[in-house]
Image (cartoon, rainbow, N blue to C red):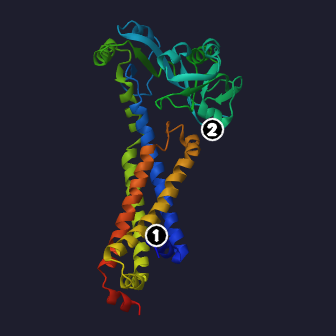
């Protein structure tokens, strides 16, 4: 009987035990891939940051607003090509569970400062010229079914309307982003619309600008420009802190906490559980196959061949579980994009994540099988046959 047939015969001798072991390994690898993908998605925004964009915010806190008058002074700084103001809106669609990011911004400059944003449906011109118009990301379209021409009611929490009604925004376009630093679960609308409504008293909320995004000219020394901007507002009325986009993204990620450490801790526990489950199964299988090992050696199987049969059993068992777990993580990627896209933009089960899952599976199979395989290799024929006689 060829060794491969023998491997599968031994594996399915106790079908329930084998199935439960494969299932536990599959669940563990699924969790490892999902957790790793969350970390990768956070890092992706930092890596994809543009080298020609600077972020100007309050030196006190991201939640302290800057005077609108700062924009004109920033435009006069040598090396600044364009500016886009951003204000966090913080509302929700219909009910609080339907939360996604909304930003009031300079519609006329947004797409120039962020060339990775492409309007794939609707009209860029309509978005830029109509005060109540908005752009919505492709992920929001997939989640809520928005279409060009729809009116989206957003209940303001940070900027509530005086009459208690929702803010109405007309979808002028649907965008896609070519880079993960701009996620596709965001709505952009006119900051002018927000400011005019606040000025008229139709709504209330903080005045000013959350942050300015500067697009710099080619060849500009970023460090010198950041120092110049910071010095420009050193005497107030609000001091600023200027950073590169990559540094800003990294700071924003750090606000969530030490996610990599948290994920590594959980991942270590999951890996230990995988190893213990696989090792327990292989030790039980090896004990039950002691007589079989003696018979194989009596029939002429070498110690090395017996070792190989036991190792292949472990690798096949872990490999099946790993393949199912990694495949399930990739298959459910669109589901997690919809569920976590707002908090983890750019979520994706990448090739690197799947490769890491495969390596974990391989390592688990080797570690779980090495001890039973060595014991089987060293076991004398007579002792093996007597053990279960």
Quadrant of residue 163 in the image?
Answer: top right
| SS at circle 1 | helix
Q: Nearer the viewer, mark 1 or mark 2?
A: 1
Left or right side of 255 for 121: right
For the residue pair 380 and 278, the one nearer the viewer reads as 380
Q: Is residue 273 visible?
A: no
Q: Residues within 10 Å of mark 1 (few under 14, many from 20)?
A: few
Residue 147: give x, y in percent of width and height: 69, 28
For the residue pair 234 and 316, the one nearer the viewer reads as 316
For the residue pair 97 and 219, the one nearer the viewer reads as 219
Task: Name the N-terminal-most of marks 1 and 2.
Answer: 1
- Residue 353, above or below 285: above
Left or right side of 303 for 121: right
Picture residue at 30% right of the left edge, 85% below the top: 380
Q: CB atoms at circles 1 and 2 under 8 Å apart?
A: no
Picture residue at 50% right of the left edge, 15% below the top: 112
Exactly how many numbered labels are in the figure? 2
* Residue under numbered circle 1: 4
Picture residue at 36% right of the left edge, 8% below the top: 77
* Residue under numbered circle 2: 98
Residue 154: give x, y in percent of width and height: 65, 29
- Residue 52, above or below 348: above
Residue 322: give x, y in percent of width and height: 47, 58
Residue 21: give x, y in percent of width and height: 49, 68
- Which quadrant would the C terminus be assigned to in this image? bottom left
Q: Which mark is residue 55?
A: none
Quadrant of residue 368 in the image?
Answer: bottom left
């Amino acid at each position: 009987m060829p060794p491969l047939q023998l491997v599968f015969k031994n594996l399915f001798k106790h079908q329930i035990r084998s199935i439960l072991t494969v299932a536990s390994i599959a669940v563990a690898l699924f969790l490892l891939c999902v957790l790793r993908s969350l970390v990768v998605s956070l890092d992706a925004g930092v890596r994809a940051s543009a080298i020609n964009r600077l972020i100007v915010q309050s030196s006190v806190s991201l939640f302290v607003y800057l005077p609108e008058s700062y924009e004109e002074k920033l435009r006069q700084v040598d090396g600044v090509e364009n500016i886009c103001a951003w204000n966090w809106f913080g509302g929700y669609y219909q009910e609080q569970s339907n939360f996604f990011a909304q930003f009031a911004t300079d519609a006329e400059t947004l797409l120039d400062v962020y060339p990775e944003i492409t309007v794939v449906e609707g009209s860029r011109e309509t978005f830029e010229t109509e005060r109540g118009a908005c752009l919505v990301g492709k992920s929001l379209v997939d989640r809520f079914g928005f279409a060009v021409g729809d009116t989206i009611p957003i209940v303001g929490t940070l900027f509530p309307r005086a009459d208690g009604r929702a803010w109405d925004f007309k979808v002028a376009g649907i965008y896609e982003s070519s880079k993960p630093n701009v996620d596709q679960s965001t709505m952009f609308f006119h900051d002018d619309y927000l400011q005019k409504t606040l000025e008229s008293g139709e709504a209330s909320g903080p005045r000013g600008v959350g942050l300015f995004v500067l697009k710099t000219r080619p060849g500009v020394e970023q460090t010198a420009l950041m120092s110049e901007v910071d010095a420009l507002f050193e005497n107030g009325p609000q001091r600023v802190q200027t950073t590169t986009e990559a540094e800003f993204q990294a700071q924003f990620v750090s606000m969530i906490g030490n996610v990599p450490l948290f994920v590594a801790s959980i991942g270590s526990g999951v890996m230990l559980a995988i190893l213990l489950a696989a090792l327990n199964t292989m030790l039980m299988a090896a004990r039950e196959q002691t007589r079989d090992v003696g018979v194989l050696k009596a029939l002429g199987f070498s110690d090395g061949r017996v070792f190989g049969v036991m190792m292949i059993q472990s690798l096949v068992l872990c490999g099946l579980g790993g393949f199912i777990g990694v495949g399930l993580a990739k298959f459910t990627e669109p589901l997690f994009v919809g569920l976590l896209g707002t908090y983890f933009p750019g979520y994706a089960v990448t090739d690197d994540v799947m490769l890491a899952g495969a390596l974990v599976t391989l390592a688990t199979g080797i570690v779980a099988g090495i001890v039973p395989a060595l014991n089987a290799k060293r076991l004398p024929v007579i002792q093996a046959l007597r053990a279960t006689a």
